[in-house]
Amino acid sequence: MGRWRHPRLFGMFLLALLAGSAALAAPAVRVAGLVARDDAAALREIGPPAAAEMIRLYLAGDTAQRTRIANLFYQLAWKSPEAANVLMRDVHTQDPGLRIAVQYALGRVSDNPKVVDSLLQTMMRDPNPVFRDKAACALTYDQVHLSEAEKVRIYAGLIQALASEEPQVRAIAIQSLHIYTGQTKGFHPIAPPEKRQQSIAQWKRWLAEYKESL
């Protein structure tokens, strides 16, 4: 390659190149600072491009850092399959703060059916009643990217949960269905089994009719 014939032009080119590199680095530094300050409003001004650095910080962080970033993803509600993938790594963590933050955040970043399935499994089968309850809350309030047709998966899981042997699971399932639909079909979590089965049969008919109406 030939020499630069105009040293001044080369100097200008070098300065521009360095400035461009600094401009690329600046958002990452800024995002890190905003994450450290829990500044969701300022992150929202940057927009979804900030998610890549947040994901990097999540992967590199300790439990407190991951909890902070999960809470920020919850507040920002940016749809991001990449964020969902890293959050799913902690969906079964036994740290209560991180577990609940992840459960709440997942539906705010994803419409992946795996998120719904994971939360339903936690609601119905986790040995910790707090995690079960918070999974039901996440299913009820935080699936913000789902279409009405996609919510059928939630309704089917909640109706299945009405037949659980665990009274708490039955209670949170009917509470969620009532919030979604305004109905209970006469279901009570501590009613006699035959009475509960009658209500579950009504819910199954309702679900079939709902699917046909979409």
Image (spheres, helix red, strand yellow):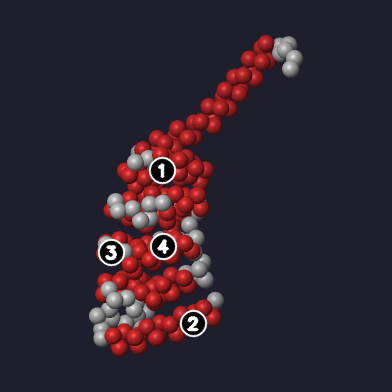
Q: Is residue 157 visible?
A: yes
Please report contact status of discs 4 and 1: CB closer than 8 Å, yes or no: no
Q: Residue at x 33, y 53 (%)?
A: 93
- Kindly identify the amino acid type of the residue bearing the numbered disc 2: Ala
Q: Which of marks 3 and 2 is nearer the N terminus?
A: 3
Q: Mark 1 — residue?
A: 58
Q: Which residue is drawn at 65% across and 20% down?
A: 13
- Kindly identify the amino acid type of the residue bearing the numbered disc 4: Ser
Q: Mark 4 — residue?
A: 118
Give the crowd class for mark 3: few <14, some 14-19, many >=20 residues within 10 Å.
few
| Foreground label between 4 and 2 | 4
What separation in Å lies between label 4 and label 1 (alpha carbons)?
Answer: 20 Å
Residue 29 locus on image (x, y percent)? 45, 32
Q: Mark 3 — residue?
A: 127
Q: Mark 2 — residue?
A: 208
Residue 50 locus on image (x, y percent)? 48, 42
Secondary structure at badge 4 equals helix
Q: Which of marks 1 and 2 is nearer the N terminus?
A: 1
Q: Which residue is drawn at 46% across and 70% down?
A: 153
| Foreground label between 4 and 1 | 4
- Kindly identify the amino acid type of the residue bearing the numbered disc 1: Tyr
Residue 144 higher or lower than 59, as above or below:
below
What is the quadrant of the C terminus in the image? Answer: bottom right
Left/right of residue 48 with respect to residue 133 in the rendered view: right
Q: Which of marks 4 and 1 is nearer the N terminus?
A: 1
Q: Which residue is drawn at 30% across and 71% down?
A: 169
Residue 125 locus on image (x, y percent)? 33, 67
What separation in Å lies between label 4 and label 2 (alpha carbons)?
Answer: 23 Å
